[in-house]
Image: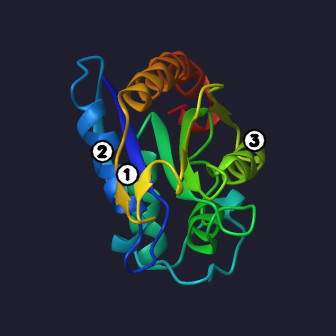
Amino acid sequence: MINIAVILGSTRPGRNGEAVAKWVLETARKRTDATFELVDLADYRLPNFDEPLPPVTGQYSKPHTHRWSNAVDAFDGYVFVTPEYNRAVPGALKNAVDFLFREWNNKAAGFVSYGASGGHHAAANLRMMLSELLVAHVRTELNLSLYTDFEHFSVFKPKPIHEQMLNKMLDELIAWSGALRGLRAASPQNAG
């Protein structure tokens, strides 16, 4: 079974992303072609990157890095739920992505973003970052506007079309996640 993480990329108190991530998870769990789990960055309390060696070495010295590594490594693909801050992802999400390397390699990602302009720039920012980590990102993404998809900019009110778009993105994500399993299995780093 394909295992997908729904990564909640905001750690801000009062964040809108919590309602969005829970809706993504509830919608995704109606499917039978993959398993889904919420991964909330706030639960990991990662400091600013503090490892003495670059992530590409895979030589981690901090307990929080090992915990984060184990969490990310357990999945075949990811749905990133992210707000847009100043045309990019929040610093906490950027930092969490930057902590690791191999754990992201040859996996797939999809995006659910939100912001004043739908979070398009945050999704584009993630695409650029994840390409460097050998993550295949799917074409379809869900972009939510604070003006039309949130009542008073804070109460998430998904429309039926959003569920359709989310499921289209999940179709692509699950297909790519499954296809990339073979690539990971053939990777020299996974050889006995």
Q: Residue at x 29, y 37 (%)?
A: 36
Residue at image point 46% right, 64% down: 153
Residue 74 visible somewhere in the drawing: no
Decide which of 124, 120 is in the foreground and name it: 120
Q: Secondary structure at mark 1?
A: helix
Q: Earlier in the sequence, mark 3 or mark 1?
A: 1
Mark 2 touches mark 1? (CB < 8 Å): yes
Mark number displayed over residue 179: none
Q: Nearer the viewer, residue 90 or 149?
A: 149
| Number of residues whose C-alpha sits closer than 10 Å to that of mark 3, classed few (under 14), some (14–19) or many (20 or more) | few
Left or right: residue 69 versus residue 93 is: left
The residues tagged by marks 3 and 1 sit, at their Cα atoms, a distance apart of 25 Å
Location of mark 1 (residue): 20
Q: In which quadrant is the N terminus drawn? A: top left
11 to 144, vertically: above or below = below
Query: In the structure shown, which secondary structural element does the residue marked by tag 2 occupy?
Result: helix
Q: In the image, what residue type sits under mark 3?
A: Ser
Badge 3 is on which residue? Answer: 131
Question: Residue 43, how many percent across, how many down?
Answer: 33, 72
Most foreground residue, 137 or 17: 17
- The amino acid pointed to by label 1 is Val
Q: Tell me the crowding category of disc 1: few under 14, some 14 to 19, or many 20 or more residues within 10 angstroms, Cα based.
A: many
Left or right: where does residue 135 sit relative to residue 4? right
Query: What is the number of callouts on the image?
Result: 3
- Mark 2 and mark 1: Cα distance apart in space: 5 Å
The alpha-carbon separation of the residues under discs 2 and 3 comes to 27 Å
Above or below — where is 8 with respect to 177? below
Hey, which quadrant is residue 12 in on the image? bottom left
Q: Is residue 171 visible?
A: yes
Can you identify the residue that label 2 sits on? Answer: 23
Mark earlier in primary sequence (2, 3): 2
Position of 174 with respect to 134 (left or right) is left
